[in-house]
Amino acid sequence: MSFRLTILGTSSALPTSDRYPSAHVLNVHERLFLIDCGEGTQMQMRRYRLRFGKINHIFITHLHGDHLFGLYPLISSLNLMGRKLPLHIFAPAPFEDLVARHLDDFDITLGYELVIHTLMGSTPKLIFSDRWMEVTSLPLKHRVTAYGFLFREKQAERKLIGEKISEYNLSYTEMASLKRGEDIKRDDGTMIMTVDATTAPPSPASYAYCSDTGYFKKLSSYVSGVDLLYHEATFSNEHASLAKQTGHSTSVQAATVARDAGAGRLVIGHFSSRYKSPGTLEDEAREIFPATEAAREGNSYEI
C-alpha cells in the first residue's frame, strides 16, 4: 500500500519567494489527506499534480493564518468544481464558527456537506479510523491551542503461501483464520501453524506531524517509534530564547525529540524567513539526529 508524503510548504509566518506556508499531503492508498492549508496550497497542489477530488479529510493544527489562510479558498474552489462528497475538517475550536462566518460573509452556498470535527483534550486521542489507517491527535505546546497528528497504517493480514492451500486442503474459513494469524486445530487433532502456511506482512507505516510547538519532553513518547517525523524547527539554536518566547522549537530541539522517540527519519520545516537557506538548521539537527533532512517544497517521502 502506498504511504507517501509530499511537502507543499516549509515557511513559517512570512512566506518567501521560494517557500510557501505550511501544507503537507499524505497519500494513503491513493487517498489524499491534507495537513494544514497555508496560503497558496491550491497552487502548490496543481504544481505537483495532486488531485483536489481525492481529498476528503483535512487536518488543521491550529488557528494561525500561516496554517489556515489557504483553506477558505480551497473550500470555495471545491464548490466551483462541483464537489458532492462530504469534506471532513478536523480543527480546534472555534473553527466551526469561523468557517460559518466566512461562508455567510461571502454569500457562499456549498453544494456539498462540510463536516467539522472539533479537536479537544490534553492527551493523545484517536480521531479517525478506517480499514487502512488511524489518526491520533497530539496536544502540542504553543501560544494557542494546537495539535499534531500521528498517522498510522493498520496492520495488514498475513499472506498465504500458495502451495500450502492445496498441501493442507485449506477451506475458506481456515484460510481466513490463518491470514488473521490464528493457528488451526482440526477435528482429527492436526495442527496447522500460521508461521508454516503464511508470511508476515510489512510493518505498518507511520508519520507524525508536529507543528507548531515549543519543546516539551513528553512529545517524544507521543511519537515513539514513528517511521517519519515532521517537526517544526522555526529557529536555529542561536535563537533558542526567541523560540521559547514564541512557542516554537529550534532545530536542536526537533532533533532531540526524534532521537528520544527512536524515530526512523526526521524532516524539519516551518523555517523563519530570517534564514535564506535551511542548511544551518539541517546541520545543527544532524549533530543530534543524523537521519535529518530539511523540508523543501515538492519533496516526497515514501514511508
Image: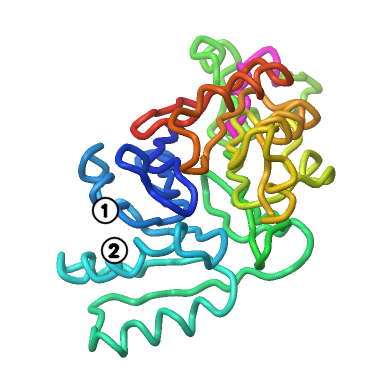
Mark 1, secondary structure of its residue: helix
Residue positioned 58% across, 37% down in the render:
230
Tell me the quarter of the picture where residue 190 sits. top right
Residue 237 badge:
none
Contact, CB < 8 Å: mark 2 with mark 1?
Answer: yes
| Residue at the disc numbered 2 | 74
User: Residue 51 vs residue 178: left or right?
Assistant: left
Crowd band around label 2 with a 10 angstrom C-alpha radius: few (<14), some (14–19), many (20+): some
In the displayed structure, 257 sits above or below 56; it is above
In the displayed structure, 259 sits above or below 199; it is below
Mark 2, secondary structure of its residue: helix
User: Residue 79 vs residue 286: left or right?
Assistant: left
**Residue extent of the magenta highlight:** 194-206
Residue positioned 65% across, 18% down in the render:
286
Crowd band around label 1 with a 10 angstrom C-alpha radius: few (<14), some (14–19), many (20+): many
Q: Residue furthest right?
A: 217
